[in-house]
Structures are given as structure tokens and as C-alpha cells.
Image (cartoon, rainbow, N blue to C red):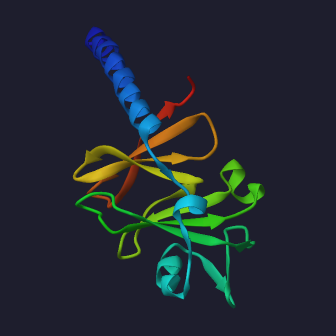
């Protein structure tokens, strides 16, 4: 039995390495969407969406997770036939709040449900899909990129793997 497990592990290692190389290639070719180049400032029309993202509002200002005044940008995302009308919500913050990324990023569907949420400064829609929904990769200013794939039963993204972007 232990030899069968060892054989399985040894044969799956090249597959995982090849899969990481494939995702690495997708990431290298991907266009990362960020709030400065692809986003638009949030408006009053986004109030419901921003509330779904859990943002606190004090008078006319939004606060981030550290109760700092925040600048909010949104980027429309077409994630495939299963999620053609999603939105990335970028919330600015200090490095003490969101680290080197400088932003909290929430990906929401058209009903305001959170599909992914973490610190990241950009998102890329990868060509690979699962259940008709594109995989995503996120940039948080380090030498690795995480690949996330769609989990239909949970209606959210799950971490698939981390890929090194070092040459």
C-alpha cells in the first residue's frame, strides 16, 4: 500500500509542475486590471454594491477596514458565461492596513455576493476556465501569483495554486 501511495505521489509531481508552468504562461500573457488604469471612481449609483462589499460609510466618505478614509474604484469583469456581469471593487489603504498591495479587492457578482476578497492591487482574468467561469490571478506586489478557480457549488473562488513569477 505504501508503495502505491509513493508511486501516485511521484507520478503526480510532474503533472503539478506542468500545470504550474501552464498557469505561469497564462499569467505572463495576462492583462492585470488595476484601479488606476482600468477602474472608475465609485459613484452614488454604486452605493448598494459598496454596501455588499462591507464598506462603512460616514457622511459622504467611505472607510476601509482600518477606519481610514478610502478611495474606491470599480472595474467591470466578464468572467464567462456563468458570471458575465461581475465587478472588482478596489478599496485604498495604507501599507499598515493592506500591506504592499495597498488595496483590498473584492470581486462581486451582479447580486452583490462576494466571490473573492483579499488584499491585492490588480486582478487578471485567465483564459482557463472551470464550469464556464474564468480562473483569476491576483497581484499583491510579490514574486508569486495565486491562481483561483471557480467553485460552482459554493458560488465563490477557491485557491488552486501559487505560481512563482521569477525568471
Residue 136, above or below 79 = above
Q: On the rendered structure, is 81 left or right of 108?
A: left
Q: 110 and 53: which one is in front?
A: 110
Quarter the C terminus occupies = top right
Q: Which residue appears farthest toward the top when viewing the image?
A: 3
Q: Is residue 161 visible?
A: no
Residue 2, above or below 127 = above
Determine the residue positioned at 43% across, 43% down: 30
Q: On the rendered structure, is 162 left or right of 6?
A: right
Q: On the rendered structure, is 80 left or right of 124?
A: left
Residue 166, above or below 45 = above
Determine the residue positioned at 46% across, 35% down: 28
Residue 153, above or below 74 = above
Where residue 84 appears, as percent x and y from the top left, is 29, 65
Quarter the N terminus occupies = top left
Q: On the rendered structure, is 21 left or right of 68?
A: left
Asked which quadrant contains residue 141, the reply is top right
Asked which quadrant contains residue 29, the reply is top left
Q: Is residue 31 visible?
A: yes
Where residue 150 appears, as percent x and y from the top left, is 32, 52
Determine the residue positioned at 32% across, 61% down: 155
Where residue 156 appears, as percent x and y from the top left, is 37, 58
Where residue 42 appears, as percent x and y from the top left, is 56, 77
Amino acid at each position: 500500500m505504501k508503495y502505491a501511495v509513493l508511486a501516485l505521489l511521484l507520478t503526480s509531481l510532474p503533472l503539478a509542475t506542468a500545470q504550474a508552468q501552464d498557469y505561469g504562461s497564462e499569467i505572463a500573457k495576462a492583462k492585470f486590471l488595476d484601479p488606476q488604469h482600468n477602474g472608475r471612481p465609485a459613484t452614488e449609483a454604486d452605493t448598494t454594491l459598496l454596501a455588499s462589499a462591507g464598506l462603512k460609510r460616514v457622511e459622504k466618505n467611505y472607510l476601509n477596514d482600518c477606519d481610514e478614509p478610502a478611495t474606491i474604484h470599480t472595474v467591470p469583469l466578464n468572467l464567462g458565461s456563468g458570471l458575465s456581469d461581475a465587478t472588482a471593487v478596489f478599496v485604498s489603504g495604507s501599507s499598515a492596513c493592506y500591506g504592499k498591495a495597498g488595496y483590498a479587492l473584492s470581486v462581486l457578482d451582479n447580486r452583490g455576493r462576494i466571490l473573492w476578497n483579499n488584499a491585492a492591487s490588480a486582478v487578471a482574468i485567465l483564459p482557463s476556465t472551470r464550469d464556464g467561469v474564468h480562473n483569476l490571478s491576483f497581484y499583491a506586489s510579490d514574486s508569486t501569483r495565486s491562481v483561483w478557480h471557480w467553485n460552482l457549488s459554493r458560488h465563490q473562488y477557491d485557491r488552486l495554486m501559487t505560481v512563482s513569477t521569477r525568471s
